[in-house]
Amino acid sequence: MEDSFKHQALRKKLILYLKKSGIKDFKVLQAMEKIPRHFFFNSAFLQFAYDDVAFQIGEGQTISQPYTVARQTELLEVRKGDKILEIGTGSGYQSTILSTLGAEVYSIERQKKLHEKAKIMLETLKCSVKCFYGDGYKGIPEFAPYDRILVTAAAPYIPEPLLHQLKPRGILVIPVGAEGKQLMKKIRKISDNEYDTKEFGDFSFVPLLGDTN
């Protein structure tokens, strides 16, 4: 895999666009400028790698548009050393961003082919993300609790297991709603029975898959 001067220039242009679009977290922008997004694309579609659009990666799933990746990551308030649970590994691009920010990442994917492909990609990039195949609605309880949980697909509701697996003062970022349009929610756990929820506008994600769909 090659990261050419052309691709580096396109990333710089993308970062400028993200800044103008309201992304303010310097560390997030720095991580996204560092990671070659085109590595996660089929070679036939490299020309689209730095456009601000979601793109098909197979199995009915997409790699989220760069703005969405940046916004979700910014809302997550990632700190170095945070233990993060990612629901929906997809291509592995978001996992790489979180790892680059210094997080300890646990990522789960429901689509077997995507899980296997992402695992190989992350190993190739020497990215120490722990990948799991399974139902994201259930989280990964054996490694809980988590400082942060990020859901990268549309959930029709907020899964209770994810709330239970979040540490006190931990943050869950999740797009909630039906297919087509979802409301981005940032949920901070105050205590076992108390949560502070803020909403951050409409986004569009593919549905979150579980064992029942």
Image (cartoon, rainbow, N blue to C red):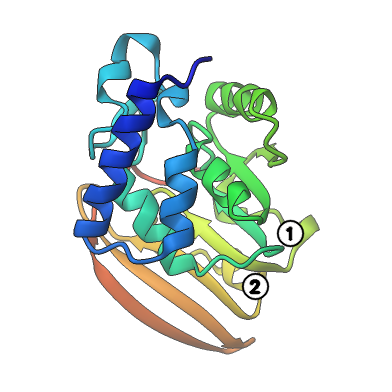
Amino acid bearing label 1: Pro
Q: Is residue 8 visible?
A: yes
Q: CA distance from mark 1 to mark 2?
A: 9 Å
Q: Which mark is residue 164?
A: 2
Spot the residue most to the right.
Answer: 142
In the rendered image, the vertical position of residue 10 relative to residue 209, given as above or below: above
Q: Residue 18 or 41: which is nearer the viewer? A: 18
Picture coordinates of residue 16 (x, y %)? 25, 49
Structural crowding at the residue carrying mark 1, measured as other residues with C-alpha within 10 Å and reported as few (<14), some (14–19) or many (≥20): few
The residue lying at 26 percent from left, 57 percent from top is 19
Q: Which image quarter: residue 63?
A: top left
Secondary element under disc 1, as helix, strand or loop, is helix
Taking 48 as reference, is 121 left or right?
Answer: right
Q: Which mark is residue 207?
A: none
Q: Are marks 1 and 2 in contact (CB under 8 Å)?
A: yes
In the rendered image, the vertical position of residue 138 relative to residue 47, given as above or below: below
Q: Earlier in the sequence, mark 1 or mark 2?
A: 1
Q: Check disc 1 and report the residue beneath it.
A: 141
Amino acid bearing label 2: His
Spot the residue most to the front.
Answer: 5
Q: Is residue 211 visible?
A: no
Q: Which image quarter: residue 24?
A: bottom left
Picture coordinates of residue 6 (x, y %)? 33, 22
Picture coordinates of residue 135 (x, y %)? 59, 44
Secondary element under disc 2, as helix, strand or loop, is helix
